[in-house]
Image (cartoon, rainbow, N blue to C red):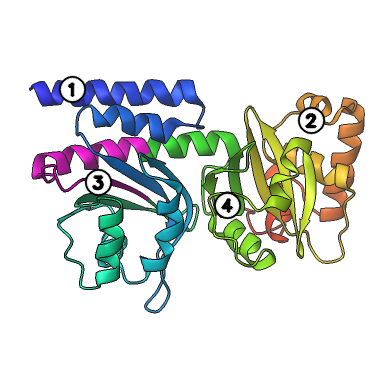
Amino acid sequence: MATLEAFNRCVLQLASLARQEGGSHFIADGLRAFRQLVPFASAWWGEMSAGAARVAPRNWMHGRIDLPASFASEWPQVAGIDSFAHDTLARPGQVIRDSEFTDPVEAVNDFARRYDLYHLMCITFELPESGLNFFVCLYRGVNDVAFDASEDGLFAAFCAHLLQLWRFQVQDMIRVDTGNAAADFGVARLDGSLLYVGARLCAAIEREVPGWNGSLLPPQVTAQLSRVPCVMRLGRCALTLSPNAEHVILSLEAPPPGVVLAPRERTAAMLFAAGHSYKEIARILSLSPATVRTYLRNCYAQLGVKSKVELGCALRTGAPGAEKTT
């Protein structure tokens, strides 16, 4: 009974954090609250691609508690041979626990020793709307006790709440809540660190910025964050940067061939597709509402769309009719 009451308090605190923090530090603060119920020495979480038989998993967005920056930069060196990571990705929704330095590959054990990852507990969830996976991993050191079955159950239940609230926050910010359209979006802090990123946006950045490995936007994109709202080129696509409180929403666009929208028109169209009103767009772009209406009328005509849903689809994918219903 005492454990149930403690868990309920933890979940209530998590819900309160979701309302207060606006997404910027929600996961970190949520895990610190959970730490009072299930103690851990360090933690790591984020979004990851699952990889394939000969392709190592890739981490595209991450956060950490009591782990140095070198942890995230070193992990890719062992990602392809880390059996624990592959196990967690292969069994989404299940908590995976392990202890001791017993990986078949000694390089993985060396990595775990450097960061005192003696006891591990991890869960991975599929994020179909982003095209990636969300994971949370907790660690204890060599002098700590192993995670047990009761903590396993609490961790699974807590992470289900954590993921759902985080997804709601992301959906509220990018104003997309169905299908896989969120794969075109990202959410970043003003310093360029990512809070969320979709698989197609990852692929576009990686294609144009060789060597980019996620979590922090490349310098050429970060340099534009202070200028939002704005539009920048990303190879054959355009990347729209829109303000959202202390965050910036990134949206990948690929207009139909032959259609050229003026930068201000494109920005107004993306803001409108994202849910902003004429008055909000006028304030953001320092325009009159009448000018915004003219811009949007031109965009609708050039893109051949008839609704806000079709407008957003055309800007992101170049296929205005892709989301039409019959």
CB atoms at circles 2 and 4 under 8 Å apart? no
- State the image quarter where residue 236 is shown: bottom right
Image point (20%, 34%), residue name: 39
CB atoms at circles 1 and 2 under 8 Å apart? no
**Is residue 149 in the magenta section?**
yes
Q: From mark 1 to mark 4, how far is it between C-alphas?
A: 37 Å
Image point (81%, 39%), residue name: 268
Instruction: Provide the residue designation for mark 2.
Output: 281
**Is residue 88 in the magenta section?**
no
x and y, in percent, of residue 150 in the image: 10, 39
Which numbered dot is residue 181?
4
**Closer-to-camera residue (156/168):** 156
Looking at the rendered structure, the secondary structure element under dot 1 is helix
Which numbered dot is residue 139?
3
* Above or below, comparing residue 77 to residue 282 in the picture: below
Which numbered dot is residue 200?
none
Q: What stretch of residues is rendered in magenta? A: 135-162
Q: Residues within 10 Å of mark 4 (few under 14, many from 20)?
A: some
User: Which residue type does callout 2 highlight?
Assistant: Ile
